[in-house]
Amino acid sequence: DALSGLQHEVHRPGAGSGHPLASVVVDGLRQIVVVPELRGVTVAGAIGLGGIGLWTVAFPLFAVEHLGAERSAAGYILAAFAVGSSLGALAFVRFQRRLRPASVVFGGLVVFGSLMLLWPLAGSLAVMLPLVALAAAADGPALAATFAVRQQVVPPGLYGQVFTTAAGLKVGAFSVGSALSGPVVSGLGSAETIVVAAGVQLVAAVVGVSL
């Protein structure tokens, strides 16, 4: 899933290659900027994770206000997301091979964001969990396809630089989304914030395609 993917990228072999940090960032950014497919999936992934960051405050409050559950139920929601994403990645392995990886990334964001719009309609935790798992099933293939794009277009000698830089961009985007989560929830409400997060996924797909 998206969050575990961040951990995979940060700890990917080659990320700590001994090069100065500034050199790693510059080399990684240069490759991301120059290669269109890599540029598109990287920016789209970062924007999408910015939207996911909005969940950090929205989920606990949504559980209380709309699901009749405790704030701790947010943990179950995130677990459902992780399970759905993992199952989606495994179930669609053969299907992914028939399409361009970049198309899977952008299509996955569209499906993920569209299904996320169903979440505010859930009236109980029992309904919310399968809806989250269903939407997350589109996230797993998109993450796997992101790695496939990098493997196809990045020279092996630059894997570490690109993976490290892309991971940094995604972590930064997630942090920005998390920081904005409180003000957005306070201003709009928890359910409305989930809708905003869904919209961010659709925006991410459009921006990615345009790049």
Image (cartoon, rainbow, N blue to C red):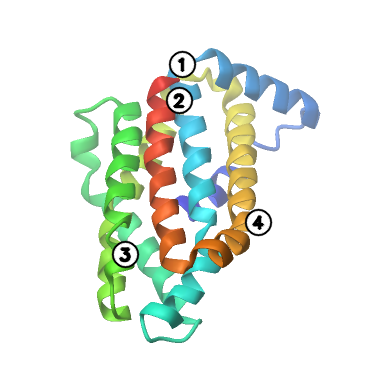
**Residue under label 1:** 36
Measured as percent of width and height from the top left, residue 28 is found at 64, 24
Q: CA distance from mark 1 to mark 2?
A: 6 Å
Q: Is residue 100 above or below residue 66?
A: above
**Residue under label 2:** 40
Q: CA distance from mark 1 to mark 4?
A: 30 Å
Q: Secondary structure at mark 2?
A: helix
State if disc 1 and disc 3 touch (CB < 8 Å).
Answer: no
Nearer the N terminus, badge 4 or badge 3? 3
At 38% from the left and 24% from the top, the residue drawn is 209
Q: CA distance from mark 4 to mark 2?
A: 25 Å
Nearer the N terminus, badge 1 or badge 4? 1
Q: CA distance from mark 3 to mark 1?
A: 33 Å
Crowd rating for badge 3 (residues with CA inside 10 Å; few <14, some 14–19, many 20+):
many
Q: Is residue 135 above or below residue 152?
A: below
Nearer the N terminus, badge 4 or badge 2? 2
**Residue under label 4:** 179
Nearer the N terminus, badge 3 or badge 2? 2
Crowd rating for badge 2 (residues with CA inside 10 Å; few <14, some 14–19, many 20+):
many
State if disc 2 and disc 1 touch (CB < 8 Å).
Answer: yes
State if disc 2 and disc 3 touch (CB < 8 Å).
Answer: no
Q: Amino acid at mark 1?
A: Pro
Q: Amino acid at mark 3?
A: Trp
At 31% from the left and 43% from the top, the residue drawn is 141
Residue nearest the observer in this picture, 8 or 203? 203
**Residue under label 3:** 119
Q: CA distance from mark 4 to mark 3?
A: 22 Å
Seen as rendered, the residue at the extreme front is 187
